Image (cartoon, rainbow, N blue to C red):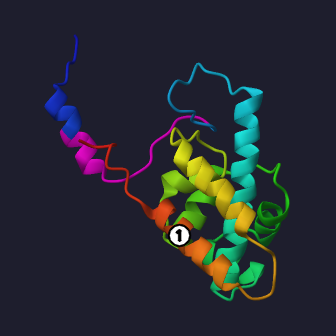
Amino acid sequence: MRLERSKEWWLARARSEGNAAVSAGLLAFDPAPEERPSSARMEVGEESRIAFGKFVHLMRRRRGLSMEQLAEAAELEASELLVIEGDVHHVPEPRTVFKLAQTFDVSQRRLMQLAGLTAANDIGFREEAVRFAARSESVEKLTPDESSALEAFVAVLSEQDLKRVK
């Protein structure tokens, strides 16, 4: 017995899924799973994780939260947040990134890319992540420049990918 589905059936199923991000395995690389990440890609991942750590740090500070308070709000361990903010080599669990995306109300797909869990095909996104990380300074209060950088980057993270479902 052979089951066949029409293109319309698959498109209807995709629309019913909404904006849910779907991947397989621990790391879902895009566009081709058989491609192994090169050393250049790994450097890009490290740059992204620097931006990811700074993003989490600044969003936490912007909301006036301690690490423990953010951990409680996101249903995460404070030790995981400490490592995210301080260790650029740490690759967080997908659940952690998902919870942070929900807590900060940003795109899960984009935050997964920023955390190095999926590959971003958009070079502009990677450049924006590096620019954001370079403009961020660790100080008690967000500077106007940090605040505007964070605002701009939140807008990038929150963008809907119109190309996904057509």
Front residue of 62 and 24: 62
Residue 77 as seen in the image, left or right of residue 122: right
Which three-letter amino acid code belongs to the residue tagged 1?
Answer: Ala
Q: Nearer the viewer, residue 164 or 83?
A: 164
Q: Magenta segment range?
A: 12-25
**Quadrant (top left, top right, bottom left, bottom right) of the C terminus:** top left
Residue linked to disc 1: 152
Seen in the image, is 139 located left or right of residue 7? right
Q: Is residue 42 visible?
A: yes
Residue 94 in the image, given as x and y percentages of width and height: 62, 51
Q: Is residue 165 above or below residue 49?
A: above
Coordinates of residue 28 in the picture (x, y in percent): 57, 36
Res. 92 in view: no
Density class for disc 1 (Cα within 10 Å; few <14, some 14-19, many ≥20) is some
- Residue 79 in the figure: left or right of residue 11: right
Whether residue 101 is in magenta: the answer is no
Q: Secondary structure at mark 1?
A: helix
Residue placed farthest to the top in the image? 1
Image position, residue 64 (x, y; %): 68, 89
Q: Indicate whether 134 appears above or below 11.
A: below
The residue nearer to you, when weighing 97 against 150, is 150
Q: Quadrant of the N terminus?
A: top left
- Residue 103 as seen in the image, left or right of residue 60: left
User: At x 75% / y 84%, what residue is drawn?
Assistant: 66
Q: In the image, is residue 147 above or below residue 40? A: below
135, 110: nearer the viewer? 135
Residue at 60 percent across and 66 percent down: it is 100
In the figure, residue 146 lies in which quadrant? Answer: bottom right
